[in-house]
Each structure stands twice: as structure tokens, then as C-alpha cells.
Amino acid sequence: MTVERIAVIGAGSWGTALTKPIGDLGQTISLWGHRKEHVAELKATRQNKAYLPGYRLPQTVTPVSDLREAVEGHTIVIMVVPSHVFREVFTGLEPYLERGAYVISASKGIENDSLLTMTQVMEEILASSANAGERNIGTAVLSGPSFAKEVAAGIPTAVTVASLHKDTAIHIQRALSSHLFRVYAATDVIGLELGGALKNIIAIGAGICDGLGYGTNTRAALITRGLAEISRLGVSMGADPLTFSGLGGLGDLVLTCTGDLSRNRTVGLKLGQGKKLDIILSEMNMVAEGVKTTRSAWNLAKKVGVEMPILEQVYQVLYQDKPCKDAVRDLLARSLKEEQW
């Protein structure tokens, strides 16, 4: 094991859960939250009652609300904030990154305006830094089938970390792997990121079908054809098609489309039951990334010219108020064709 000082940026459910396997290794961790009152509660109770109740923070964790305090002197920084605030938060902490540090995106989304993935956002900000060439910051993405509640409970989990530089991926792998949290190393960054972001859209679709009362036949078909859509877009952007058969592709997709802990499936489930999107979102205290990512992915698919029928129908349900039953009908009514990937 590599001894590190690790900063987890984002004190929601996933950021808090990540402190469990890292804490089991005895690593020193700072856990940053954007609200001072929330951080004060974390310090006082050693629990994240708002986002992950019932789990006590390891003794090696120090909750903080100041980005400089969270990042300065730390060798690994894990970004676990929603995609729509990722740029703002990373811009705020970038000046305090240590020379030779590793920054990892554990956020699953695509930026709405730029259509960039989270590592692309980090690379863009790092490249514009005045002393970019001197610090040698390594970037990576962490993804895979990993519900926060199960990771925090110590349930065996396997994920993947990818970096364009294999040595970076291996370094992070060794720093984060524990007996209950197995990390695989890879180099297909864009494939891993797109798999993690787009599976949330398919999960909304799966939830819609469940909410309409359709059976497991429907869900299996949606998962399979959803994977085909994710693969098509990924390969068109340079991803390795084999990535989508792995933990960050099929593994994460199956988990998110079938698990009761999935926020995105829950959104779809309630849509299928007849609830309006604004009401659903107002009732949730955590972010369902697939809602915003659907807009980003829809624009990205149009930009690169990739056909994604499931994405198209989920987009119309979310942003054009299309009835869920009409979306399913239109998916099935498309012209018949050979099965393709």
C-alpha cells in the first residue's frame, strides 16, 4: 500500500462512503463540504446524517469547509461533487494542488454547456494555469458499480480507475485498494467516463418501464440496447469497445438499472407512475445526475452524429413533457433492422 494524504472533495453520500475503504487503509483524509454548518455537524457527530445516516466517519477523517485546507499538502484529490458545480469547485482548489499530485474524478456526468467530461474539465483548467507545466499533475477517473450505502457498509465492491498514463492509474490503484474495495487499473479514460455518465440515462428509462408496470423482459431489453447506445457513442469518441463490457460499462449499468438504491432509476420509476419531474426532484435531497446528463448527452449525440433512440425518448420525457407510454410506443414502432452494436 502507498501511504498518502487524501482529500475527498464533496461530503455527499458518495464522498462520505469513499472514506470507508480509504480509512480502512489508515490513510489520512480530509473531507470537504461546501456548507459550514454541515461540516460542523460532521465534526461534532462523526456522522453524515443528511446524506449517509448510520455510518461513522473513520478517525483518520477530518471534515473541513475551506478548499485550501482540504487540498494543500495532499497527494491525492478525489472530486466527488455534482457535474454542474464541478468546474467551479475545481477552479477554486486548483491553485492549492501540490506538485506531482493526482486528481481523480469520481463524479459521473457531462458538463451541460461545454459537453466535456469531468476529466476534460480538469485538464482544461490545469492547462490554463500559469505554472501548468511545472507541477506535473496527474488526472484520472474512478467509476464502477458502487452504491454509496453498500461501500460504507463494507460490502465487497470492485471499481476501475483509468488514466491516460498507466503509471498514474497503477499508483492510484495501489493507494485506494483494500480487502473490501478492489480497484482495477485501465487507460481508457473517455470510455470509463462515458459509461459512468450515460448509464444514468438508461437507468431513468428502466425506472420508467418499471413504473409503467412492465416486466423483466422489458428491463433486460432496455439494458441491452442501452449498452449498445453507450458503446456507439463511446467508440465514436475514441473509446475502447471492451470498456463497455467491464465494471464501468455493463457492471455499472446493470446495478443502476436494477438496484433500489439508484436515484436515477427512482426518478424514472416515479415518472412512470405519473409524477411530474419538478415534483420528483423537489422531493429528493441528493442529485440524480442522469437528469442533467440527458440534456448534455442529447446535444453530444447530435454533435457527433450518433443515433441513440433510448436517449432521444428519455430526453423527450424529461424536457418536452412527453407521456411515458408514448415514449415506449415510439421506441418499439421504429423500423425493423438487424441487431447492431
Image (cartoon, helix red, strand yellow):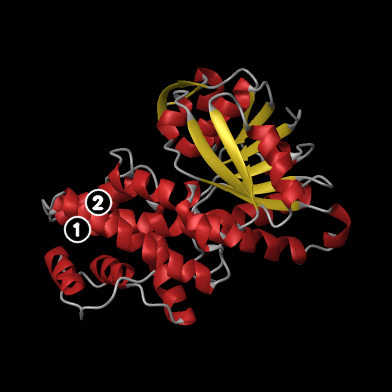
Q: Amino acid at mark 2?
A: Ile
Camera-side residue of 301 and 158: 158
Provide residue 34's location: percent of width, then percent of height. 55, 42
Side of 232 where 78 appears, left or right:
right
Q: Nearer the viewer, residue 133 or 11?
A: 133
Structural crowding at the residue carrying mark 1, measured as other residues with C-alpha within 10 Å and reported as few (<14), some (14–19) or many (≥20): some
Q: Which mark is residue 280?
A: 2
The residue under the point 30% across, 71% down is: 339
Q: Which quarter of the rendered picture does the C terminus lie within?
A: bottom left
Going by the picture, which residue comes out furthest to the front?
Answer: 338
Q: Residue at x 52, y 58 (%)?
A: 242
Q: Residue furthest right?
A: 134
The numbered disc on residue 124 is none
Percent position (x, y) of residue 317?
23, 67
Residue drawn at 20 percent across, 71 percent down: 331
Q: Position of residue 293 (x, y in %)?
A: 42, 62
**312 versus 212 height, above or below:** below
Q: Give the structural element (helix, strand or loop) at label 1.
A: loop
Who's the residue at 44% across and 65% down the image?
A: 231
Tell me: residue 178, above or below residue 133: above
Under tag 2, what secondary structure? helix
Dot 1 corresponds to which residue?
Answer: 276
| 1 and 2 marks in contact (CB < 8 Å) | yes
Q: Is residue 295 left or right of residue 324?
A: right
- Specify whether residue 54 is in view: yes
